[in-house]
Amino acid sequence: MQADTRKMNVIDQFAHRFSLQGLLFGITLTFFLVSILFPFYWMVSSSFKTRAEIGGREPTYIPSALRLEAYQELLDPENPSYQEFGVNVLNTVKVAVPTAAIAVILAIFGSYAIARLRFKGKNLMINAILVVYLFPGILLIIPLFSMLARIGDQIGFDVQDNLGVLVFTYLAQTLPVALYMLTNYFRTIPDEIEQAAMIDGCSRLQVIWRITLPLAVPALVSVAMYTLMIAWNEFLYAFVFLNSRELFTMPITINTIWNDPSPRPHVVMAASTIMTVPIMVLFLSLEKYLAEGLSAGGVKG
Amino acid sequence: MAALSEKPAAVSSRRRRWRSKDAREARMAWMMISPTAIIVFGLVLFPAFFSIWISFRNVTLANLNDVFHAPFVGWDNYRAVFNDFAFKWQGLDNWGAAVTSIVYTFTSTVLTLLVGLAAALVLNKPFRGRGITRAIFLFPYVAPIVSVVFVWRWLLDPRPSGVLNDILMRLSLIDLPLAYLAKRGLALILVIIFEAWRYFPFAMLMLLARLQAVDTTLYEAAKVDGANMWQQFWNVTLPELRYVMGAIFLLRLMWTFNKFDDIFLLTGGGFGTNVLPVLTYQFSFKQFNFGRGAATAMILLAILVLFMTFYVGVVMRNIDED
């Protein structure tokens, strides 16, 4: 274990690779990379295949050309089996972006209160919120459904096919995580800076706005990213709460296309690519902020 | 006289001011946390208790909107679940959802932990391109579940054009294409492998963070004592990772036990892979028997709570005493 050595030079690395230990290391690394990357390669490459290449006797490992047949079926209104996938993309954005924005704003205040202010019932509150980790989504969906149906009858909104209701249920799922992550981060910011600002006459809200938030940008980015990801990927609640195709989010549409009587895996792969690429690009560009948050229990599931 | 009486008055007024400052702070704290608290309590904790209530009632599609007047049926829902063929153990070739859930959760959690450990050990070594490799290792965890599930299902396609069938047939390991996800036993094993593939990055990140905090002098001391690689791993690395491995085990176990999407999308709960969350879904949204669904969910929660109490009370305490 040469955990303390710095990057080895080329010759060392060469010699290293040919030791038994190095060989084992190389094999493990290759195994991991292949088994991780192959499914992603398969997804993207299959999205460019034609119907003939999909339905052949043998799998086509490399598509003959970058054909957009599958994408046209999803997005081109001229196509005979047009899927209106653009609407589904928009629905997902309509659900995911507000969820992330609201979760971040609410979590900023909530976590600041927990990290900095003293009040009765604080520990009870924290524990109650963390217990939420324990409840399976499937347990909550039945009571939530009937509860919201009842409230909806009174106030006048529909539970089903209502993206706003979906945002609310996603908030319930993401807020505990957001609160937990931000509280931990706020606690690492030294209290003295804020005390000094208060002595200089800043109010609490000014302190939060001018001092705490600028220092917490990495944590805010990762919380926003996580809540966005959870809402973007969520399947169960959208599956139960949405009935009409024009309100489906992407995961539900992809499931529907896959279960279509005439199998069109290339279209499923194209839709999956459209859904996966933005998330992966966002993830890779923000990776340095995110890895820490991930291990802090960032993503539930 | 005036000077004498001024001091206590100043103290008490200052005390009052402090007290009121505390009170102001507490009021402010409540204002700041209440939106979150209302959403979390209203949409999670209240429904959770409400679902206990539902599990003792006969709730169907007809009275879902009027659930508060649903007829009370006592333990009938629980009795029905325990006697259901999808739930109960019926011998080795048909485990039922309860046993399948437990076996599936334990094996996939252990496998996830082991794969995560291997990945963390690989990434703990300095090599060129480590940063990008680490990012790639996180892909399965970050990608949307729906897209990775369907890629897997298509790689495991039962037709000869399925990739795994093609490879195994070319290697002459099988003569005829297999329907991997439609075979009892094999389907469960594949679902477990899928879980390990998707969730090992979580274990890896936590283990990696701990590995990088291990005091390197421990390894130097071990080397001086003549410990080989394996002994160093067994006697230095593993003890250092014990706590974090316990934490990962608990978290993953909990989340896997509650997980619905993965099995529902991979096999729909068929072919010996039916687990309690999927069974809950089937009772509620296939048979529209919401009371029975809620009872299933409560049984699921009860098993989980029992296990957690046992784990925290017995296992963690033993670790502490070591």
Image (cartoon, rainbow, N blue to C red):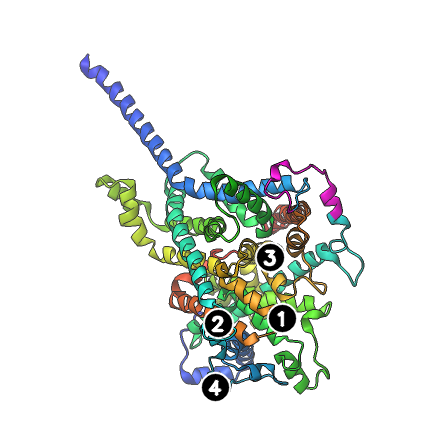
Same subunit, labels 3 and 4: the answer reads no
Numbered mark located on residue A74 in the image? 2
**Residue B301, percent from left and from top:** 63, 47
Residue A46 x/y as whole percent: 53, 79
Magenta-drawn stretch contains B76: yes
Tell me the mark number nearer the camera, choosing from 3 and 4.
4
Does B113 appear above or below A31?
above
Q: Which residue position holds label 1?
A: A261
Q: Callout 2, which amino acid?
A: Leu
For residue A295, say whether it is visible: no
* Residue A66 coordinates in the image, percent (x, y): 46, 83
User: Mark 3 = which residue?
Assistant: B259
Q: Same chain, marks 1 and 2?
A: yes
Q: CA distance from mark 1 to mark 3?
A: 27 Å
Viewport quadrant of the C terminus of chain A = bottom right
Q: In terms of image quadrants, where is residue B241? A: bottom right
The amino acid type, in three-letter code, at marker 4 is Ala
Q: Nearer the viewer, residue B153 or B302?
A: B153
- The span from disc 1 to disc 2 (Cα, nearest Å) is 17 Å
SS at mark 1? loop
Query: Which chain does tag 2 point to?
Result: A
Q: Are marks 4 and 1 in contact (CB under 8 Å)?
A: no
Query: Magenta segment range?
Result: B61-80
Q: Are marks 3 and 4 in contact (CB under 8 Å)?
A: no
